[in-house]
Image (tube, coloured by chain):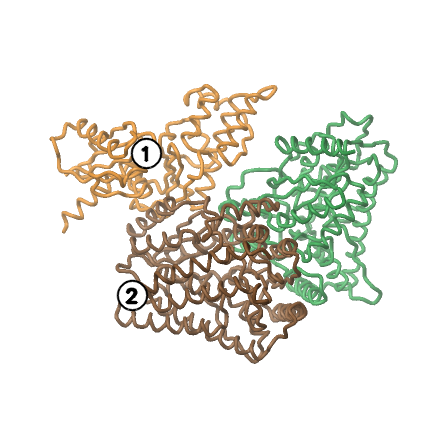
Amino acid sequence: MKKAANNKIQSIVRACRIILAMIEADSNTRQSQKMYYRMLLQYYTRLRDARENGQFIAAHTVFFPAEILLAMDIIPMHTETTTWMTSLFTGECGEILAAGARLGMATEICAPHRGMAGAFASGALPRPDVMVWSNMVCDNTAKSGELVMDICGCPGFFIDRPFKDSGLEKTYMAGEIRDMIAFLEDKSGKKMDYDRLSTIVERMDRQIELTRQVNELRKNVPTPFSPLGFLELLTIDYLFPGQPESIEYLETLKAELEEMVKQKKGAIPKERFRLMTLFIPPMYLMSFLEKLSVESGAVSVIEPFFTFWGEGRLDASRPVEAVVEKAYMIPETRMYGPLGESALEAIKKCAREWKVDGAVYYADVGCRHSCATIKLFKDALAEVDVPVLTIDCDVVDQTVTSEEEVRDKMERFFELLEDR
Amino acid sequence: MLSIGIDIGSLTTKTVVLNNGRFLASVVSETLDEAEISAQVAMTKALERIDADEDPLRFVVTTGAGAKGVSFSDRSKAITTCLARGIAYCVPEARAVIDIGAESSTVVKTNERGKVLDWANHDKCAAGTGIFLQQMAKLMKLSFEEMSELSETASKGADITGTCAVFAESEVISHVHRVPPTPMPEIILGIYLSVSSRIKTMCKRIGANEKIALSGGVALHKGLVRTLEKEIGQPLFVPDDPVCVAALGAAVLAGEEIQKETAQ
Amino acid sequence: MYDHQNKHNSQPRYTPLKTLEVFKAVNRSFPHTDEINHIHDQGGKVFGWLCTYVPEEILHAAGILPVRITGYDRETDLDDGNAYLYMNNCSFSRSCLQMGLTKEYAFLDGVVGGSTCDGARRLFDLWRQYIGTPFHHVLTVPRKYTENAHSLYLAEVEMFKTHLEDHLEIKITDEELMGSIELYNQTRSLLRELYNHRKKPNPPISGSEVMEVLDACFRMPKESFNHHLKKLLQELDGSQNAYSGRARLMLSGSVLANPDFISSIEQQGGLVVADELCTSTRYWGDMVEVQPGEPPLKALARRYLNNYPCARMFPSEERFRRIIETAREFKVDGVISEIIRYCVPYSHDLPLLTKRLADINIPVLSIDLEYGSSGSGQIATRVQAFLEMIEAKK
């Protein structure tokens, strides 16, 4: 593949280096945050050099069990995350989305997935050896794989994650994972190391436990974790499931938060509003939102569908079944379905236990299945007296909303909360 | 101490002066290039209207697009908070207010204390706003009064399904130039229905379904109000001075700030 | 209900099909058809179903009248649907929800759906929360055709049957199931006969007329539908009607139930001779084949999963293969792809589908629209241009 293709990954590597240098120079930043950026740097450096090093690259979608790839020494490329990072750090978001449009993708297809196809087509992302994906948690993800296979001329495997969480359906999914392992063994020439997978599962179990403990600490008033820190928790799960660095990061973070709580210190100077975040804020507005949070005293203290894990433990003695179990425990899959009382109870529980003042719903214009829950969640949260702000936006596409619009809406919302 | 509220809109600036909660005056002036100057001119006019002293004691709350850039503003407040307070003052029974301004439309759900419970707004494009209606009026060479009168005679509204002002405009144009042309009353009713549809969706999103008031310049557009009432299925409260509701609310908030400071 | 004008200026002679009026009457009076009123008077039940992955025969075998949930038959205000499903869900799901929220589906005693796509998923979540029908069931539908997938789907179908039996306090016997399967197979073969007429160079029935027939199929007891369809086929056998057009077209895409849309294509001179829609071949395309000694439920489940594919199924090539097969069978000159805005699975398929069809020299006109569209205005203009392009190639 052309050297040019790797330059876009290089843009992520460069951005990580710059951010890392900045925060390492700042004595006020968390040790855990530095670890986080080091992990990102390592991930993207490895991806950038994988072709040259003759390594086997598997592109995969979000919420896909990347632990399977890691257990087989296959280099993972998380397509949605890499696409949005590339869009952001090259400043070529428009071009990447336009490339997706030229392929014939409708604008209603969610931006990370349009962008993914466009990024592969334009060579912004390196060509993978295989494309592996699942239908977690929406149609867009389910339908992304085949076009990527066509564009990249590579084989692929689709994991069918069923709808309900019955024993029968979990057995089906385990079968899917086993079939995928056979596919990967065939294409990569590598064998699955089940002992290694068991170790990864053990670590994933610990990772989830630590995440729960971190969330428990966030219940404190004032909350010890930075306003948008939850994005780190998310990315750790997406990119480094069951990796030793994840455990290190979480243990360090936990200790930092415990220390803050002991000293009765909050993440921001004056905590005024404790927010619940529903869905993800636009990626290109992260630093703006961080600033706004500090200015206005608003912190996100819990994210029911991104950081609030379902109950359960992972049994490392049956690693494939454990991977299935995890797929059902991931916070987002609580939304998958059927969306009933238990999901609504989870939201209300989060609101009560984290002492939430208000919720912010980032209504991503490309995300059908999540926007259809806005009214449902509003009504549920009204039962526990939590108002909800809806912000129409897009995770990747910068033309949908602006800093100004978001600021205006947030300020109206903060006034609403203050006024009560 | 005077409570002064100034709403700096895209076309006009509205000022309301209260004293201890008692209404003294309201003034509407043109919004100029700079918010600072618009607000200054507006306030000067308002103070002249009440024959005030040279530099009376006052608390000024600004709202609207240019609110923050006004140097003599004591506090700036979101338009939604101002609308809620304003409507509570002039229509105490209201539990929601539909504000159709020049460039955006907003529905605010309120409680009996004039607090905002929720809101929805439409600011992505001009469809359903004052500017859109003005454009349509110009296109058909009619005044708002003429539009209102004509719409009464329509038995049904022309199909205008465009979700965006540009599409809606081209649909209106094609209705006008059709052979034979769609009757004017039907086109007008079609426009009203299209605006109402947008408003209805906003109301439903936030559960604003009863005791609804109207504010903003468009509230004086009788034909639209009538259609809106019919579509929403509720009588709509239109205050005497719908244009100044937000400014009134800003003045009420100014009064609250004065009370807070006196209490300390 | 339908503002349906069939302009036959281009046709030399046209004798209206008498039996078609029966179907049109059903469509216009639905849900207050004589049959539904009668069933309710007798204390019978009517269940609504959504998606071609719901095995209708089971409902029939339980003595229920199954009717398809198809929302409004035209583009209309969907304020309630918009408020709950939000603007970025397809107008089909919003239309169905709107009808549910305004109690226009209150005549249903039960609803059954599949976990087929995001729109359907959420529709059923919201339906359960805000509308509530005495019986509510959603089947998990795998996205693959593997043995494991078939096993899972069969188990799902069995669970659905059990849930239904418990709710109605009855038992559905294999004999009853076989009876329903045979009845529905008859419907399918009659519809195949109807479609065979469209293979002719000058078909005696238009695409929009066929859509009227299909719409009625979703709303009538199959016994009565089959009876009338047989009559229609007899009429067609003896009919002198012969439609001609500028090009033979195939309609492909998601849910479409408004014959007016097809009319407006045909008014431009396009002969719609074939289709691949949730409301057409995807519905009736395949027969249930019960092997000797095989439990009928197993054969039923096998057929429903293997059925003419929805874009949600993997691999997409299977759907493309069938579309190409149909296009060849009906000798089409071009394909009109109609995709409802925000219909994700079908939008994703379009780039590859277009490629596959281009490989066999079949051009594709891609139209995105709202559910219930009558196809006027912009759409008619684009169809014109498409037909001109095809004619120029000939």
Q: Quadrant of the N terminus of chain A?
A: bottom right
In front here: A16 or C188?
A: A16
The reply to whether callout 1 and callout 2 are in contact (CB within 8 Å) is no
Q: Colour of chain C?
A: green
Q: Percent x, y for residue A355?
A: 34, 62
Q: Is residue A375 above or below residue C16?
A: below
Residue A275 falls in image quadrant: bottom left
Q: Is residue B8 above or below residue C181?
A: above
In front here: C73 or C204?
A: C204
- Residue at (64% x, 48% y) in the render: C346
Side (left or right) of C154 relative to C185: left
Q: Report which residue position mark 2 lands on.
A: A27
What element does badge 2 sit on? loop
Q: Percent x, y for residue B177?
A: 57, 21
Chain in orange in the render:
B
Q: Percent x, y for residue B189?
A: 50, 27
Q: Amino acid at mark 1?
A: Gly
User: Dot 1 falls on which chain?
Assistant: B
User: Dot 2 falls on which chain?
Assistant: A
Category of crowding for the residue at label 1, using alpha-carbon neighbours closer than 10 angstroms: few (below 14), some (14–19), many (at least 20): many
In front here: B128 or C105?
A: B128
Q: Report which residue position mark 1 lands on.
A: B9
Side (left or right) of C258 relative to C177: left
**Which disc number belongs to residue C341?**
none
Chain in brown in the render:
A
Q: Amino acid at mark 2?
A: Ser
